[in-house]
């Protein structure tokens, strides 16, 4: 069905009227000094600052892995006698979801990819890891970390920048390149 000439004219007429109304609204707004709202540019979310490339967590984890290798003179996984793997990951003893202990280096061990995965996904694996942790570093430290992990910890973007900057400095001081 095609538009009849009459309807077409009516359509054009209503569009013209709408344009006139819009022009009048804009004229009035200009007269009153109303400005069109400028679109705000959204800043990066904390999640991106924390986990993006060169973000807080990747930088912190790299620094931790390097320090661990220096300190213990070994690149082996913390559970190497069980898995035989090389340490590639900074693995949390108390879940990384607990923010109060997420960036506490005492809460981290060097793990291979397999152990880090199994820790979160394989029944009983976490208990083995905790038992080994207590054997090596002492139950008191584990207990302290458990208590600390329960503390309320609100970290904003500035905290993320700050933690990342400290890790970057430590990496630089050791003369290593960043990620
Ligand atoms: Zn392993």
Image (tube, rainbow, N blue to C red):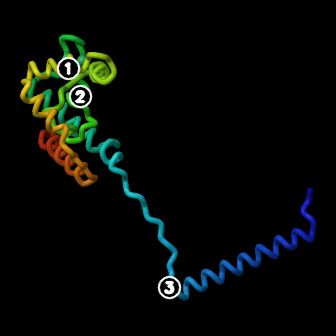
Q: Report how far apart the C-alphas of labels 3 and 1 lie in the structure.
A: 66 Å
- In the rendered image of this protein, does residue 2 appear above or below residue 78? below
Image check: 130 left or right of 179? Answer: left
Name the quarter where the C terminus is drawn. Answer: top left
Work out whether mark 3 precedes mark 2 in sequence or the reverse, and give the earlier one: 3
Q: Mark 2 packing: few (<14 Cα in 10 Å), some, or many (20+)?
A: many
Image x and y of residue 97, in percent: 28, 36
Disc 1, SS = helix
Work out whether mark 2 precedes mark 1 in sequence or the reverse, and give the earlier one: 2
Tag of residue 33: 3
Tag of residue 129: 1
Residue placed most toward the observer, 30 or 141: 141
Ligand 1 within 8 angstroms of badge 2 C-beta:
no
Ligand 1 within 8 angstroms of badge 1 C-beta:
no
Residue at label 2?
91
Residue 76 shows in the view = no
Count of numbered badges drawn on the protein: 3
Residue placed most toward the observer, 58 or 156: 156
Work out whether mark 3 precedes mark 1 in sequence or the reverse, and give the earlier one: 3
């Amino acid at each position: 069905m095609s538009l009849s000439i009459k309807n077409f004219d009516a359509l054009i007429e209503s569009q013209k009227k709408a344009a006139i109304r819009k022009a009048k609204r804009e004229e009035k707004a200009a007269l009153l000094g109303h400005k069109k709202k400028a679109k705000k540019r959204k800043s990066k979310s904390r999640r991106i600052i924390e986990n993006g490339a060169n973000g807080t967590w990747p930088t912190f984890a790299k620094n931790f892995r390097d320090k661990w290798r220096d300190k213990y003179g070994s690149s082996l996984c913390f559970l190497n006698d069980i898995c035989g793997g090389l340490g590639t990951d900074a693995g949390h003893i108390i879940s990384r979801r607990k923010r109060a202990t997420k960036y506490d280096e005492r809460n981290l061990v060097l793990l291979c990819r397999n152990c880090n995965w199994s820790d979160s996904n394989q029944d009983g694996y976490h208990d083995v890891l905790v038992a080994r942790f207590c054997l090596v570093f002492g139950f008191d430290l584990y207990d302290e970390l458990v208590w600390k992990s329960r503390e309320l910890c609100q970290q904003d973007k500035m905290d993320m920048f700050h933690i990342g900057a400290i890790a970057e400095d430590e990496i630089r001081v050791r003369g290593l390149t960043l990620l």
